[in-house]
Amino acid sequence: MVQKIWFSLISIGLLMGFTVNAFAVAGFSEVNNELFDKAHLKNITEPTILHYKYNRTSFVDGPREDTIDVVVSNIRNTGRRDTHFEFFTGENKRPYQDRDNQQGNSIFVFFLEFDVHELNRLTGGDWRYFQRKIRWALSKGADKKEVEIDYQGKKVKAVQHIIQPFINDPKNSRYPLYASKYYIFTMSEAIPGEIYQVRTIVPDGKTWQEGDAILTEETLTFSGFDNL
């Protein structure tokens, strides 16, 4: 499972960075608390595999599809669970360590880890820099929108949190293609694990709304579950 020791250490370090101050503290934004502090796994009451689909369209790298599975086990009376991640398949599989005794669904953390390393590759910048910008944007707050999503043949309520972490960065001229990048987190208590989708959009311009032209889109979307 472990492919390279140094890569695992980098991954662990970034995960720790994203989860610093992970518990609800006065003054933290709603989106920060919803992502990092909420007990997303509370609605999973028996060992379960959560299935996610990854899709990418990109004028730089072309299309790509893959899958991610989150294995939730050791259901405790405290509300905590153990988690194991099969993040991508084949040569793209990423060597993430198990996270035990968890309340939250870390799938979004690992997706952000993947995202900042992709930005590192595409821009020649430092993934730590992009990581800090995303963390700061989440701590400041997000645009919030109530939506409906399709789940098991019916519409269920969900909430979207939207940030543009790089838009006001005075140094974003160093990575102009990605300066306007959007991050959209869609969450629903009707979904096992509560994280329905993480979506990123690189618009063909400074702003974007549904239906506008895009340069790159990546989505991580909940696709179902199986009981173990």
Image (cartoon, rainbow, N blue to C red):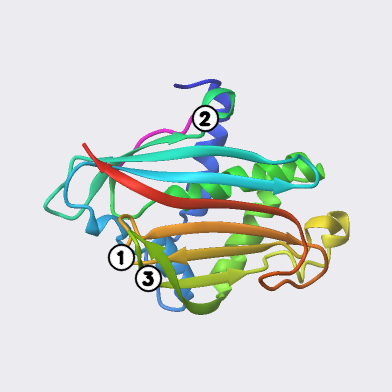
Three-letter amino acid code at the position of disc 1: Ala
Q: Residue at x 45, y 75 (%)?
A: 30
Disc nearer the start of the sequence (2/3):
2
Q: Position of residue 73 (x, y in %)?
A: 23, 40
In front of the other: 162 or 53: 53
Tell me the quadrant of the picture where the C terminus can be found: top left
Q: Which residues fall within the magenta stretch? A: 94-100
Disc nearer the start of the sequence (1/2):
2
**Tag in front: 2 or 3:** 3
Q: Quadrant of residue 159?
A: bottom left
For the residues marked 2 and 3, what is the alpha-carbon distance in whole angstroms? 39 Å
Q: Position of residue 75 (x, y in %)?
A: 17, 45
Q: Residue furthest front?
A: 153
Does the magenta portion include 96? yes
Left or right: 53 in relation to 39: right
Query: Tag on residue 8?
Result: 2
Q: Quadrant of residue 7?
A: top right
**Mark 3 highlights which residue?**
155
**Mark 1 highlights which residue?**
190
Tell me the quadrant of the picture where the N terminus can be found: top left
Q: Residue at x 77, y 67 (%)?
A: 169
Query: Label 1 neighbourhood size at 10 Å, few (<14), some (14-19), many (20+)?
Result: some
Three-letter amino acid code at the position of disc 2: Ser
